[in-house]
Image (tube, rainbow, N blue to C red):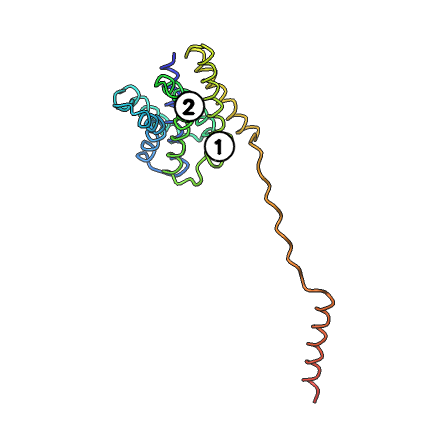
Amino acid sequence: MLHALYLLGISAFAASGVLAAHRARMDPFGGLVLAFAASVSGGTLRDVILDRHPLYWTQDWQLLAVIGLVAVVTMAYLHRWELPHRTLMIVDALGLSVVTVIGARAAVEAHVTPLAVIILAVLTGVTGEVVRDVLCGQFPPLLLREEVYATAALAGAVCYLLLDRAGAGPGLATPVAAGVVFVLRMAAVFRGMHLPRSRPRPSPVRATASPVRATASTRRKLRRTVTSGTP
């Protein structure tokens, strides 16, 4: 079940890459590039930090085949039909939730500190989205435009870590933590939930000239005009 859930998250990120390429009016090759970049970037960064070699996706032909198949099917669908505007957000949230928890599990299995587990889980979840948005020219990336994005990944990572410390197995901790991430992202997308934002201070109003002075100046100008026009 865990492997199937992992393939589901990777497929969601692959589809999100194609959707982003479609909105950026890229060709099919660009769609394939974004599909693979969005799918494997987070896990690659995680494995490099953990010094895990060879990289996970270089030894898993099924993973690469699923990414390619999802990319082709998504492009074929978009060639004939349009998807709703929020489809990218929903698909991206699905990928974020699963990949974040997979990152947390990999970090736990590497026996790193709890803080490192949380950091690696968040990095695994958000890196693919950042790379995808940068490659298709969207600035700032979704991570910096939506406050409840990395926060959702953070909540899911903490949830997984707490369940693991409580003795829950991966079969329980993974879907529960992934559900936390997905629910938070959906609340942000459909309900506008966000963190408290700081309000900018109003700029000081510049002092304007006194009405009395303006009137006196106007009178002097009129007097000069009348004087110069007198024969």
For the residue marked with disc 2, what is the amino acid?
Thr
Label 1: how many Cα within 10 Å (few below 14, some 14–19, many 20+)? few
Which residue carries the number 1 mark?
85
Residue 133 or residue 67, whichever sits in front: 133
What quarter of the picture does the C terminus occupy? Answer: bottom right
Q: Secondary structure at mark 1?
A: loop
Q: For the point 43% across and 24% down, which residue is it?
A: 115
How many circles with numbers are drawn on the protein?
2
Q: Quadrant of residue 14?
A: top left
Q: Is residue 6 above or below residue 200?
A: above
Nearest-to-viewer mark from 2 and 1: 2
Residue 127 or residue 50, whichever sits in front: 50
Label 2: how many Cα within 10 Å (few below 14, some 14–19, many 20+)? many
Residue 210's x, y, as percent? 71, 64
Query: Which residue is most to the front?
Result: 113
Q: For the point 36% across and 16% down, which residue is it?
A: 109
Q: Is residue 231 above or below residue 177?
A: below
